Image (cartoon, helix red, strand yellow):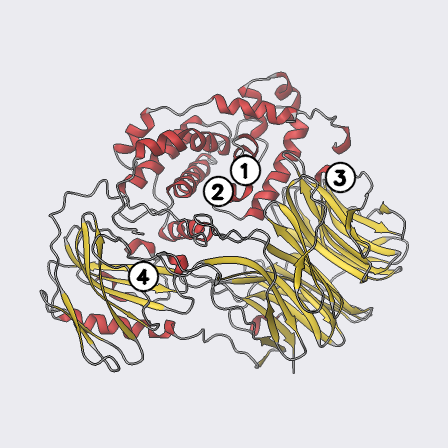
Amino acid sequence: MSTRTAPATDFEALFRDLGPVLWRSIYAYSAGDAEIADDAVAESFARAMESRKPIRHPRPWLFTTAFRIAAGELRRRRRDPPPALASDAEIASDPGLGGVVEALRQLSPAQRAAVYLRDVADLPGREVAALMGTSESAVRVHLYRARRRLRTILGDDEGANDDA
Amino acid sequence: MRETWQQRLRVLENLRPDDGLLERARAGSNPRLAPAPRRRRLLAAMVAFAVFGAASATIAVALLGHEPPTPAPQHTSGKLTGPANASRVYRDDQSGFAITQPTGWYLQPVQSGCGTFDLIGAVVSNIPNPLPQDTTPGSCTWPPSMSTMPANGVVILFGIGEGGAYDAEQTLPADTPVPIHLSNLHHRQGSARYLQVTFHHQSQYALDVWRGTEVSTTDHATAEQVVESIRPWATPRTDQHYGQCLAGWERQPIPVGDLGAGVRGIDALSANDAWAVGTYSHVLGSVPPGPNGPVVVTAPLALQWDGSAWRLVSAPDPELQTKEPFISGGSEFVDVAVVGPDDVWAVGRGGNYGLVEHWDGSGWSVVASPRMNLLDSTLEGVDGTRPDDVWAVGSGGQHGEIGAVVEHWDGRSWALSAIPDVGTRYTTADAVSASSRTDAWVVGEQLDRALALHWDGTRWTSVATPKIRAPRLTGVVDLAPNDAWAVGTSYRDVDGRGPSYPLVEHWDGTRWSRVDLPSSLPPQVSLNEVAAAGPDDVWVTGWGEAADHQQSDIVLHYDGQSWTVTNAPNAIPGLSGVRAVASAGGATWITGSDGSETAYRRSLPVIASPCG
């Protein structure tokens, strides 16, 4: 195995394969900020292209890099006053993307990313941990909290009384 | 079936990134999005390695797409001279570069490369023949996979390369304790010829490169200097301090190799009979070495204490895959219960399922336990009072659900034990302890309350605990029907963020009440586990954070009258993160980590006992 002169990475194929899930992960992570998602995805690919250091695992590399870039942008934006959170009733009345984004805003960024990768993108817990650059047990905690909150906000088929 | 909230989240799948983003990436990195500091980059790389390093089916990709065109490679040639049993010299014919084999080390010529890159040189190592056999031009075998490097090996490559170059300096943060002060010598971007020093150690590696227009006569001295400066890393760790009594604690040797390990649970029957469990990495001997060397996997770790030493006892890994290209391990033990000398239970996880194994005095074997068709399940705790009365607890769940799981062994089989509906779907059970067939406790967390379930011999009932903000109970010890201790942490908010406060609660037969702890504790404390040798000998582990954010390990002791903060075993150099505790027959053990995890060294467990 060489880490030095394997064939040049086909970024187009990589973008085709990873792009959508990567972009949506960052979109969820930033609670619906398409600008941050654009920035983080383009920037992580740009850094991968510019890196002359061998990148052994482009998939976790791109994800962890993009999450880091997004985290920096979220920090930067924290200086602005946050817009008010929507009420549960408002969220319930918006069945589309708007309601989902408002619900995501009530979670922490890591919780949002974990719940997207695990419950929407259907990736195994181990892989979610690798992509988020964290441990499986941390992912389990994020998921536990995120699912609990989302169930309250967005509803649960089996009756919401038992864990209210 | 997906729940409403999951179906609603799926609206995200309709979103697609703009194809223009790839074009934007090709236009280059955006200075507004300042790169993360170096240290962060290394951590990201380590995470990737930690996850994938153990698998042999690693994929290597070098990003040379943006390299300027390089001239066609021209081989230089080198020779190894000198008697086989003495110090030998490797000399590059073309440049005159030479390296002498240091005493006690090995020198192996290397010729490697493929595509636009060629390398010729020698390897200096403290292990014989560290390189894969196939090092012919075009074989692309250097550097070998990190995960397959021998545990105690240091390998330093001195090579003269031509062709595609890369800048590996950035893989090391500035404060790396490897003596890489030579890193910037003659560094010149873009040069086609350079001397490379590659440093492999303990299945991690660091690279350093310097380049010049040509290799000069000073290189010889430089190379020797590198060998000398790295020599300390070729020997076993020097920070172990076994057998010394340091501020009341003595570290015991643990024979788990050097590839990384962690102890999660420990339990003792007597001063001469204890078990510790966790997970560790080792070379998989049953699979022939691949093109990159031996195969390393992680496996459940079981250690037995016989009164004088810890012994490694092999335990089956139901997750072990030995067929290429998916060679991997991955099961882990989390807790252990010593019911009798020939009756020990270990629980944890294997893949997505809870794992239960039993020691019968001669070996460990997997015992079937309820699978429940659940994903994401782990068994976190185990305790037993008799060969036909053992409890295992944890959590399990499908998409969107995690609930407490309580299982019981009746001497013949494991079965789920019904627990009261306490909003169980979002409940986790963290620990179990039983004093008799008719008295057991399970603790954990449910929504915004602590979970405490009591077994009276017939059924589990939910028992109220003191009303405290966002509590989580992670340890319990049941001494008698009127004497049990539970420990854990209270957080400022339900997300587990913000300050944490210690929770020690006592059961007097009627109710749980929170006890006062010494005021000398730091302002923030989080408690992990509790163990007791008797009502007047109770131990608790945790960690604390001072006002200046200094973190420290915490060990609390109860003597039957009051709680005191005792010396944590932090005098043992490097020890960090005390975790599990066991106490029996006058002996006490506390487990932790040696905190030595670096880019080229994995963390090892520490087990310490009071001394002096």
Which numbered circle lies on residue A114? 1
Which numbered circle lies on residue A132? 2
Residue B239, above or below B440: below
Q: Residue at x 14, y 69 (%)?
A: B97
Relative image position of residue A109 (x, y in whole percent): 52, 37
Relative image position of residue B533 (x, y in whole percent): 77, 70
What amino acid type should be assigned to the residue bearing mark 4?
Pro
Is disc 3 placed on a helix, strand or loop?
Answer: helix
- Which residue carries the number 3 mark? B424
Q: Residue at x 24, y 66 (%)?
A: B182
Question: Which mark's residue is nearer the viewer, 4 or 3?
Answer: 4
Mark 1 and mark 4: Cα distance apart in space: 39 Å
Q: Could you classify mark 3 by the number of other residues whose Cα lies within 10 Å: few (under 14), some (14-19), or many (20 or more)?
A: many
Mark 2 and mark 4: Cα distance apart in space: 33 Å
Relative image position of residue A116 (x, y in whole percent): 53, 32
Tell me, yes or no, whether dots 2 and 4 are on the same chain: no
Give the chain of mark 4.
B
Which one is in front, A104 or B155?
Answer: B155
Mark 3 and mark 1: Cα distance apart in space: 22 Å
What amino acid type should be assigned to the residue bearing mark 3?
Thr
Mark 4 and mark 3: Cα distance apart in space: 53 Å
Q: Which residue is drawn at 17% across and 59% down?
A: B194
